[in-house]
Amino acid sequence: MTSQEPVEVAERFVEAYNSGDRDRLLALCAEDIRVVHHNRGVDLSDKNAFGDIVKGFEAAFPDKHFENRRARHTDGDSVIIEHTWVGTAQADVPGFATAGEVARIDLCSRYTVRDGLVVEYHDYG
């Protein structure tokens, strides 16, 4: 594994998420990926459960994506990206937005990559 590989995997993860290609996104994830959204009460360790969350957000925010990248840092198998999550709510989504409103959440996302797969994904924000 080269030192660039974790960065490349994290970039492909963001690209797949932004494109709405859930299959491509999940193909980048370990079966027991740990997903934690530290301010939203999400803490799971299962690729299928993560896929269900992504599917729910696709329905609630069809245009969901990351934008406004401000920083990217790497250290070994960890990649940290500071960016903004954006999506227009199709219906009221408590804690995010009311129907028709554009939600914006500034985040730091941390990806831990091993053997070409994301094994941990943490969002802070």
Image (cartoon, helix red, strand yellow):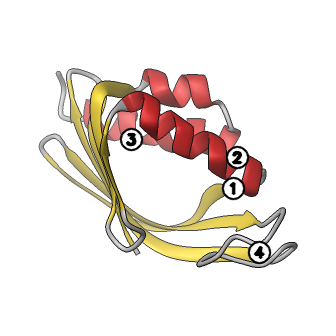
Q: Which residue is mark 4?
A: 102
Is 118 positioned to the left or the right of 52 in the image?
left
| Proximity of marks 3 and 1: CB atoms separated by less than 8 Å | no
Q: Earlier in the sequence, mark 2 or mark 3?
A: 3
Q: Which residue is mark 1?
A: 64
Q: Which residue is mark 3?
A: 10
Q: Residue at x 64, y 47 (%)?
A: 56
Q: Residue at x 37, y 66 (%)?
A: 41
Q: Earlier in the sequence, mark 3 or mark 1?
A: 3
Q: Nearer the viewer, mark 2 or mark 1?
A: 2
Please tell me whether residue 115 is drawn above or below residue 72 in the rendered image.
Answer: above
Q: Which residue is mark 2?
A: 58
Residue 54: percent from the left, percent from the top?
Answer: 57, 43
Residue 2: percent from the left, percent from the top?
Answer: 19, 26
| Proximity of marks 2 and 1: CB atoms separated by less than 8 Å | yes
Label 4 – label 3 distance at C-alpha: 25 Å
| Proximity of marks 1 and 4: CB atoms separated by less than 8 Å | no
Q: Nearer the viewer, mark 4 or mark 2?
A: 2
Q: Which structural element holds mark 1? A: loop
Q: Earlier in the sequence, mark 4 or mark 3?
A: 3
Q: Residue at x 16, y 40 (%)?
A: 77
Is 55 positioned to the left or the right of 39 in the image?
right
Label 3 is placed on what type of residue?
Answer: Ala
Q: Earlier in the sequence, mark 4 or mark 2?
A: 2
Label 2 is placed on what type of residue?
Answer: Glu
Q: Nearer the viewer, mark 3 or mark 1?
A: 1
